[in-house]
Image (cartoon, rainbow, N blue to C red):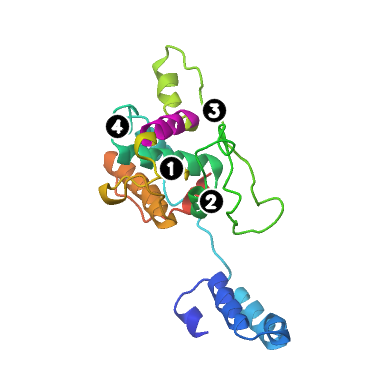
Amino acid sequence: MSLKDQHLAFGSLKVHLAAISAFHPGAAARSVFAHPIVRRFLKGLEKIHPPTKSPMPAWDLNLVLSCLMGPPFEPLATCSLLYLSWKVTFLVAITSARRVSELRALTCEPPYTIFQLRPHPAFLPKVLSRFHVSQDIFLPVFYPKPHAHLHEQRLHSLDVRRTLTFYIDRTKPFRKTTQLFVAIAKQIKGAPVSSQLIFLWLTGCICACYNLANVLPPAVTAHSTRAQA
């Protein structure tokens, strides 16, 4: 109850309970969740504080996409590595609906990118099942052959496969890992990035687009891209 008074989510309380179970080996660990008092407490707590979900998304996807079609994110051949990294990470996240940990596990060499992506075989996803382990990630083509119409050309700039091709080609000279996303800071340039850095890239991309549109950026999280996808 003290944890709930600290405004922790119901799922976080269950994680704490699982941690308690981990320190009680054998049959005692299995009985923690099954204990009648614990079960009644969790059931009552969920009824008193039911999970809520905002009917409106945390940020405007159309606003972000419209900014990604122009400077400083375009043209890809001349934009900075930072903006290229932000754009490719965001497009992969929004088209694949994957968690940050799964994005970090993507590799840039065949047979894991054709362009169809697959996490490295050693990666264990959050949900361990035959379906989720080494699951293929198909990234659809968006306006692959734009005609002379300017609108179609702008929409083609959001094609995730085009952006990935540019990204892999530009990072190849300094790449030190087969991991898809690599660091661009001078001290660690070419090294594999952490999940925390991918988190910062996603939120940084969204906030940068809001600033370009002269709109106050909301409080965003990297996980919100899954809901938007």
Mark 4 crowdedness (10 Å alpha carbons): few <14, some 14-19, many ≥20:
few
The magenta region covers 161-171
Residue 19 in the figure: left or right of residue 86: right
Question: Which dot marks residue 21?
Answer: none
**Mark 3 in CB contact with mark 4 (< 8 angstroms):** no
Q: Residue at x 57, y 74 (%)?
A: 15
Q: Is residue 1 magenta?
A: no
Q: Nearer the viewer, residue 131 or 59?
A: 131
Query: Looking at numbered disc 3 in the image, what kind of residue is underneath it?
Result: Val
User: Which comes before the other along the chain, label 1 or label 4?
Assistant: 4
Q: Is residue 162 magenta?
A: yes
User: Which comes before the other along the chain, label 1 or label 3?
Assistant: 1
Residue tagged by mark 2?
Answer: 102
Residue tagged by mark 1?
Answer: 89
**Mark 2 in CB contact with mark 3 (< 8 angstroms):** no
Does dot 3 land on a helix, a strand or a loop?
loop
Residue tagged by mark 4?
Answer: 79
User: Relative to 209, is 158 above or below?
Assistant: above
User: Which comes before the other along the chain, label 3 or label 4?
Assistant: 4
Query: x%, y% of residue 126?
Result: 59, 59
Query: Looking at numbered disc 2 in the image, what kind of residue is underneath it?
Result: Glu
Query: Looking at numbered disc 1 in the image, what kind of residue is underneath it?
Result: Thr
Mark 1 crowdedness (10 Å alpha carbons): few <14, some 14-19, many ≥20:
many
Query: x%, y% of residue 125?
Result: 60, 56
Whole-Å distance between the Cαs marked 1 and 3? Answer: 16 Å
User: Relative to 30, is 177 above or below?
Assistant: above
Quarter of the figure with residue 25: bottom right
Residue tagged by mark 3?
Answer: 141
